[in-house]
Image (cartoon, helix red, strand yellow):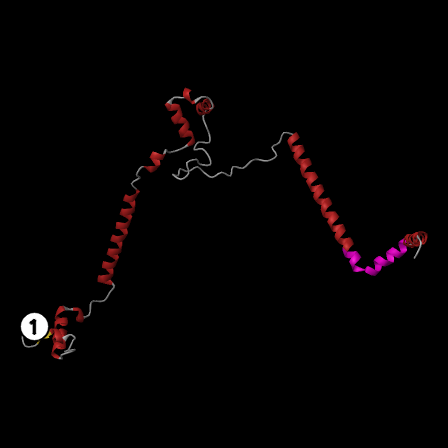
Amino acid sequence: MASPRRERREEGRRRADECDQTPKVRVQACMRRGSLCKTTMLRLTAGRVRTLLSRQAMAALSTSSARMASHGHEVSEQADISLPYFDRLDTPLPDRPYQDSLSAAEKSLKQKEKGPWTSLSNEEKLALYRIMFKETYAEMKRPTGEWKTVVAGILFFMGATGLVVLWQRYYVYPPHPPSFDEEWQAKQVKRMLDMRINPVEGFSSKWDYEKGQWK
């Protein structure tokens, strides 16, 4: 069994051997690894360059914004992305009021609105409502008479279609064949009866040959 003193000596010798490695040995080991070391170095360099460029861009942007603000220029304008005003029964509160630009009287009325409503008259309340909304629910539900336009349009197109069909009947389609005439059809029926076509259960079975009439 090794003594503690001997173990301490061996550990000190190992540490001394590790410390004896010169930079030349380390460089040779890196050269043996070859492309792996080069790839790692390139990746580290590219990452540091990207980080540095992004920091410089942010710093330049913040500096220019601060300069514009210090000189009294407007840095950015807030765009109005709300939907246009419209009246719908399923949307009691539109995204924007009906009237955006107010007159001096309307502005004073809006300031008065912030106080107690008991001091407002009915006319002022109605004026405030018209500033926010274009129509009331009763006005939106009233009949518009649009069905008259729809019915008139349907009748117009039906009449135009009938005129086109009538024009085609007289000027486009050929005349009916003679087999469509009543006289021709009567002769055809007499011929079938004379030939006694289907005398058991068919056409001729419904004719009484003795009386000369249909059964």
Prevailing SS of the magenta stretch: helix
Magenta region includes residue 186:
no
Q: Position of residue 209 (x, y in %)?
A: 7, 77
Asked which secondary structure carries label 1, the reply is strand
| Category of crowding for the residue at label 1, using alpha-carbon neighbours closer than 10 angstroms: few (below 14), some (14–19), many (at least 20) | few
Indicate the quadrant containing the N terminus: top left, top right, bottom left or bottom right: bottom right
Q: Residue furthest bottom?
A: 195
Q: Residue at x 79, y 56 (%)?
A: 38
Q: Residue furthest left?
A: 211
Q: In which image quadrant can residue 97 be found?
A: top left
Amino acid identity at mark 1: Gln
Indicate the quadrant containing the C terminus: top left, top right, bottom left or bottom right: bottom left
Q: Residue at x 17, y 69 (%)?
A: 180
Please indicate whether residue 26 sits to the left or right of residue 75 in the image: right
Q: In the displayed structure, would residue 97 be above or below residue 56? A: above
Q: Nearer the viewer, residue 107 or 90?
A: 90
Please indicate whether residue 15 sits to the left or right of residue 107 in the image: right
Label 1 sits on residue: 213
Q: Residue furthest front?
A: 1
Q: Nearer the viewer, residue 205 or 10?
A: 10
Q: In the displayed structure, would residue 52 be above or below residue 117? A: below
Magenta region includes residue 31:
yes
Q: Nearer the viewer, residue 83 or 92?
A: 92
Q: Position of residue 123 (x, y in %)?
A: 37, 23
**Residues shaded magenta:** 21-39
Q: Position of residue 2 (x, y in %)?
A: 93, 56
Q: Residue at x 77, y 55 (%)?
A: 40
